[in-house]
Image: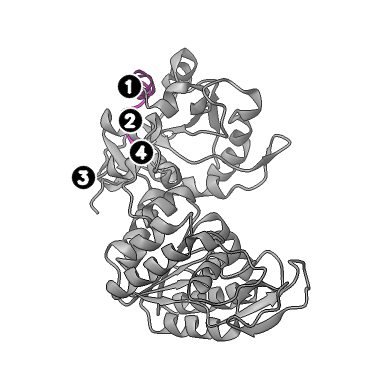
Amino acid sequence: MAFRTLDDADLKGRRALVRVDFNVPMAGGQVTDDTRLRAALPTIEAIRKAGGKVVLLAHFDRPKGKRVASMSLGPVVAPLAALVGAPVAFADDCVGPDAAKVVDAMRDGDVVLLENLRFHAGEEANDPAFVAELARNGDLYVNDAFSAAHRAHASTEGLAHVLPAYAGESMRRELDALEAALGNPQRPVLGVVGGSKVSTKLELIHNLILKLDRLAIGGGMANTFLFAQGHDVAASYCEKDLADTARETMAFAAKNNCELLLPIDIVVAEKIEPGAAARVRDLGQLDEHERILDAGPRTVARLTAAMDASKTLIWNGPLGVFETPPFDAGTTAAARHAGALAKAGRLIAVAGGGDTVAALHHAGAAQDFTFVSTAGGAFLEWMEGKTLPGVAALQA
């Protein structure tokens, strides 16, 4: 995947329109988690160091084309300035005279944040007229928001066609990691897909089967596969109407030489509550009121052995109800093992998706993975093999 980066850009004295993801958690008008602000710092610093002018474009929440005071990006300015270590100016609009006045006053190395893009309907509509208005405040375009790259919006796709376009540092790191995981990986490649529903991850599973050597399926979705194999799942969550689909998926994996790793033992309980009495069971050996809530120890041991035998791991979704101990044991053990292998340089371990990120942090393993994507929907669509408009627009 060849794409233009900041290494290819002439930045001195030029206005760089930088699309960032500042859709940050807020409470009471205060930013409660600055992870996404920190993610933008390498790109901001690279442009400032090269003598460029940083004009930040972002959305917040879903104002649906209307100005909503509670969805202003104003509260982001102070914490961002503290992280940058320099003043950050703020424009009360992202287009028009308010934006132009602030941008025109910039000196080399300055940083400006423009108001919420989604206050204008033209953003999500990718309206050419709105794209042109945005472009007036820039000499070049930098996309540093992989998390929004699956949307063909004015600021994620449209601008790349009217200004010289480059990938920012965060975008570059994400694309490099994804290429290493599935684009051109070191083999053997192991996938882990968990979560509750088969129905929401069918495209993902089918695309992975075509690219992986082994695929482990966990979480509630594994129950559907176990049911399709004829095992009793008692009171467990299960999409029984997808049993035929599960059997077709198993046949598809066999046809494409991808070994499916389904649970071989399970952890069950009657209630999902902290400290609930949990029991390890063989497949199908459940009482009628019991639910499958985690992978069993033999299942986890087989998965960690598969990690030992692999060069690359791509992970999306927990193995059990990790939010409620003791049903976090399987996910935690597997995550820590993968993290240790990655830290030792024995495994390229890439993970992503909201629940996945939370599970890896819960296990204390996120920092040891080669790369953990916080992109959510964009990460999933990439895993499904879909073309991401915001990425395609950057390709050289």
* C-alpha span from label 4 to label 1: 18 Å
| Label 2: how many Cα within 10 Å (few below 14, some 14–19, many 20+) | many
Residue bearing mark 2: 158
Question: Circle 2 — which element?
Answer: helix
Sequence order check, earlier mark of 3 and 2 = 2
Q: Quadrant of residue 143?
A: top left
Residue 83 painted magenta: no
Report whether residue 371 is seen.
no
* C-alpha span from label 3 to label 2: 16 Å
Question: Circle 3 — which element?
Answer: loop
- Asked whether the residues under the numbered discs 1 and 2 touch, taking CB atoms below 8 Å apart as contact, a structural biologist would say yes
Q: Nearer the viewer, residue 228 or 356?
A: 228
The residue under label 4 is which amino acid type? Val
**Left or right, 65 with reference to 309:** right
* In front: label 4 or label 1: 1
Image coords of residue 326 (percent x, y):
71, 74
| Label 1: how many Cα within 10 Å (few below 14, some 14–19, many 20+) | some
* In front: label 4 or label 2: 2
Residue bearing mark 4: 142
Q: Residue 396 got which mark?
A: 3
The residue under label 3 is which amino acid type? Ala
Q: Quadrant of residue 296?
A: bottom right
Image coords of residue 369 (percent x, y):
48, 69
Residue bearing mark 1: 128
Residue 55 lies, with reference to residue 385, above or below; the image says above
- Asked whether the residues under the numbered discs 3 and 2 touch, taking CB atoms below 8 Å apart as contact, a structural biologist would say no
Question: Circle 1 — which element?
Answer: helix
